[in-house]
Image (cartoon, rainbow, N blue to C red):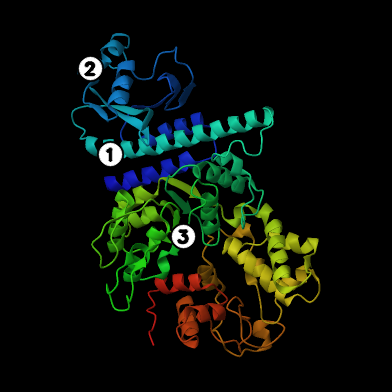
Amino acid sequence: MPQSDIALRGLYEISKVLTAPSELEITLANVVNVLPSFLQMRHGAIVVLDAEGELEIAATAGNTHVRQSGTRRVIPQAVTDQIVATGTPLFIPDVRKSQLFQADLQTSSSIGTIPIAFIGIPLKADHDILGTLSIDRAGDGATDFRDDEDIYFLTMVANLVGRTIRLHRALSTDRQRCGHEQSGPEKSPNEGRTYDPARHADAKIDGIIGESPALKQVLETVSVVAGTNSTVLLRGESGTGKEFFAQAIHKLSRRRKKSFVKLNCAALSESVLESELFGHEQGAFTGAISQRAGRFELANEGTLLLDEIGEISPAFQAKLLRVLQEGELERVGGTKTLQVDVRLICATNKDLETAVIKGEFRADLYYRINVVPIILPPLRERTGDIPRLANAFLNRFNKENDRALAFAAPALDLISQCYFPGNVRELENCVKRTATLARSRTITPSDFACKKGQCLSWLLWKRADRSNGGNAIDDLARVNAAPVGLRLPASCIGASAGKISPFTAGDPNDPTCPPRLAERDRVIDAMDKAGWVQARAARILGLTPRQVGYALRRHGIVVKKF
């Protein structure tokens, strides 16, 4: 595997370690233990310093020492001092010839006659230096090490570790402040008006419902991240609520009184996307009858959500990277440089690491947006929240339609065992569909069965038997529904004849049932019937327009223009 691919995989694995729910000391030790999988090294160490420059945490491969400043340090004091003082990487080809290691060499006989190379990197968070990350390795004169590439890789790792340390410290400070405020004297209503993220951490966030440990961990991370201006990358399957979590970060941030602007990058062509994000001047292109501000300008001093960031073209990625790095842009057709101050949140369900390896996504843009990755759990990992979500969706349906429906306990038990490839969005559609067709005020398990051609076959799929969620159009292919719009015998669709649902499988033992079509053919058939309007085709297939768009791109189906 090429060295660049190994480094990218290493960053991905280390990002997962850093975002795992565990104590900071354990997290740092895990990072050091992962490093040997991606570069040649003998020993590795992460040293974290406190505000006075004393040793706070020392994590080595397999060992972690906390607040033991009086013990022997994992690397010489002179080495740590130089890295911290200069704030730059330190590379020593042979520590036996370095003055920085002389004191250590006099008290240690482990090095011997073998040349040992040393690489030390400062741990940075913004402009603060929090400690060092270092490795050493033995050389035999025959092995060709890529020192420059390893220094570059370790620098990126050190930046990720530094930001993680900053976040852990901020969370610890907020917890201590909360405890002090609860035990301290009562304050007046007008006291303490400054922003405090911990004060908003337990606030109810519209659209986010649940008490599962997986969801609580994400909300805790959101409450910490919201207090900073760091770029956030929301990752998760389709329908997990990335937009809701982006709004939560904005509402809990210092920018909450400014604009929250969002844009779906997958829904627009490259030229339209450039105009939407950067704006355009009057006469810049046909139809530009007046000057228009872009989404970056509209989100100035606020938050901008770029949904489906993985779908933008490589050419536009270069344009976007400049804005993210410099905070400057020019409107399409303009020459004036505009300064913008925007908190960026990106969202995607795409495997960006694989896209970078394939050359579909720029590595430098990946590093720029993957500052604080937050992985949203799929619904199958938080099944305890399904009854709460279902009741919330039903209450919303009742309010909007002046109804008084309620779930029977067995109905909630049944729906809690279902597999939802579309996650929370699909659960909401399931509740709306069932409530619409309910025959009484109490929804029972029989209301979820195949009635009136609305067969929800995915209700029969137990989550234990499924492993790849988040793509309803793929599950549609596995069900192999019959052609859309055909008049079929009753044996093919259940209790009543009519147009078959794309989720309904025909009876394979009935010779009158027509042959089943492949997914690509069904999508084309639906688009033909809908006049190549994706929203209409989505209604025919029982999917969302976004899922139909995914299917069109995956199968290379060119949308006809009329």
Q: Earlier in the sequence, mark 1 or mark 3?
A: 1
Quadrant the C terminus occupies: bottom left
Residue depth check, mark 1 versus mark 3: number of the one nearer the observer: 3
For the residues labelled 2 and 3, the Cα–Cα distance comes to 57 Å
Residue tagged 1: 152
* Residue 331 x, y percent position in the rendering: 30, 64
Q: Is residue 236 left or right of residue 394?
A: left
User: Which is more N-terminal, label 1 or label 2?
Assistant: 2
Q: Residue at x 28, y 66 (%)?
A: 332
Q: CA distance from mark 2 to mark 1?
A: 24 Å
**Image location (x, y in percent) of residue 487:** 61, 90
Dot 3 corresponds to which residue? 261
Residue plotted at (75% across, 75% down): 438
Q: Residue 387 is drawn in which quadrant?
A: bottom right
Quadrant in the rendering for residue 140: top left
In the image, residue 313 above or below residue 372: below
- Report the residue marked by disc 2: 96
Q: Name the residue at the top extreme.
A: 106
Residue 449 showing in the rendered view: no
Amino acid type at mark 2: Arg
Residue at 28% x, 60% y: name it: 330
**In front of the other: 334 or 461:** 334
Label 2 crowding class (10 Å Cα cut-off): few <14, some 14-19, many 20+? some
Pointers 2 and 1 in contact (C-beta within 8 Å): no
Between residues 399 and 367, which one lies in front from this camera angle?
399
Local packing at callout 3 (Cα closer than 10 Å; few below 14, some 14-19, many 20+) is some
The image quarter containing residue 138 is top left
